[in-house]
Image (tube, rainbow, N blue to C red):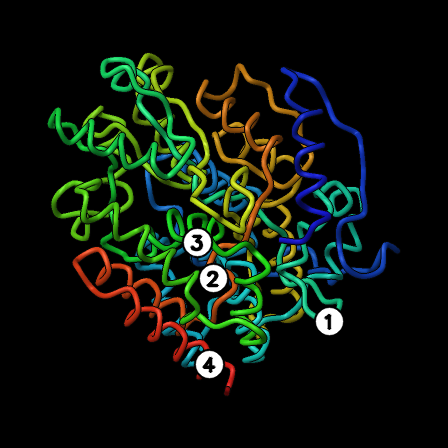
Amino acid sequence: MKKSFIVTLAAAMSLSLIAGCGSNGTTDGAQGSTAPAKTETAKPGEKVKLSIWHNYTGEDLRAKTMREYMEKFKKDHPNVELDIQGIPPDGYRPRLKTVAAANEMPDLFVMWPGVMTKEFVGGDLIQPINELLDSKTEWKNNFMPGSFDDFSISGKTYAAPMALSPTSILYYNKEIFNKYNVQPPKTWDDMMKLVETFKKNNVTPIALGNKAAWVAQSSILSSLADRVTGTEWFLKAVDQNGAKFTDPEFVQSLTYLQQLGKAGAFQAGFNSIDNTQMEQMFAQGKAAMMIDGGWALPNLASNSSKEALANMAVTVLPSVPNGKGDPNTLSGVVGTGLGMSKKVTGAQKAAAYELIYALSGPEAQKAILESNQLVSYKVALDTTKVSSLFAEVYKMMGTVKMTPVYDGRLSSSSADVVNNGLQELLMGGKPEEIAKKVQDAQAKALGK
């Protein structure tokens, strides 16, 4: 995450946490020219077919909001035949990779910043949207500075973010903590003592749903490892320039995660339930803690009572002994945006631009925020429209820095190795062996 984004995020959020207030501030956070550009247009009444893939299939508030906006677009654009395919989150990335390998991309699709964007650009599969952004400068300039960085390559921007995704929030149940007279962990020793206390009283310390494998990596390791190694080491290891994943500090990161597993921090069968089931488990008071992303907030708001939400609180992961990283951080990325296939042209492209704006323009950004989903767009939060828990997370985001998520920086093949390796690690695998697999995969991906 670029420094400009980290600094401005804190300032922008601390200023805008005011119920019902508007925001007119603008900052140029996009790539490319700020001069208005002429976008492609469709002839009046011209029939257009457009396909879009998304992963908003759940019943959480954000998913419902995005589906409603797609349906609204269909009603407002009768000349556009919209082929909408919703794919459950855990299966979405593999499906997208499959069609990418066959060069059969849908016209528009939910896409991640960082590695995915780079790989799709490298494969000549997508096209930039600078023309759209430059035609709507007020919209473009109201994103937080740095928001487009991980969607941009060589001055060309390929998507506008529709969310902001911290991935490593430590959620905890205040009632359970009060019952056993314990506090949120500040240090690793605190965390291990909490696990011991809860286990002794037959309470699951930490809910985990790692069936899809990415959860332990994105929500736990990315932040925990940064505590140990520091961000600079990780970026060097990603580039294979001055650091390797076989270095002692990364092995130590894996060892800390394995300590949790060996101590019984997670419920039995954690590799067989998914992220949504994990969130349900925590919401129902069946675990004292959960380490999850900001994406949990719409789910929790949809499926929990006001009393249950008021009983939830959040903090960051604890510090580790002799850690090189800043402990007051959360791993995270700007959220997904809509990528556009290279094959989209003419009237179809004009319709695609309209749909991108409909789903990530100012009105949609406000609706997304009010669905209990963080955004990287400057819009004031009306706290009466969101859950108390979301308001707490929103406020916390103004006090912490963000660090990289592993699968946002590693090659896709290396990220798969990490994900599978963590499942193995938590079932008793050796940290050194898993570290070597990650190192070999990243070196191979970079041709080193």
Mark 4, residue position: 443
Q: Amino acid at mark 1?
A: Ser
Q: Amino acid at mark 4?
A: Ala
Q: Nearer the viewer, residue 22 or 341?
A: 22
Indicate which disc, 2 or 1, sits on the residue closer to the N terminus.
2
Q: CA distance from mark 1 to mark 3?
A: 30 Å
Indicate which disc, 1 or 4, sits on the residue closer to the N terminus.
1
Q: Amino acid at mark 3?
A: Ala
Indicate which disc, 2 or 3, sits on the residue closer to the N terminus.
2
Q: CA distance from mark 2 to mark 3?
A: 39 Å
Is 129 placed left or right of 229 in the picture? Answer: right
Q: Nearer the viewer, residue 371 or 185?
A: 185
Mark 1, residue position: 154
Q: CA distance from mark 2 to mark 4?
A: 37 Å
Mark 3, residue position: 225
Indicate which disc, 2 or 4, sits on the residue closer to the N terminus.
2
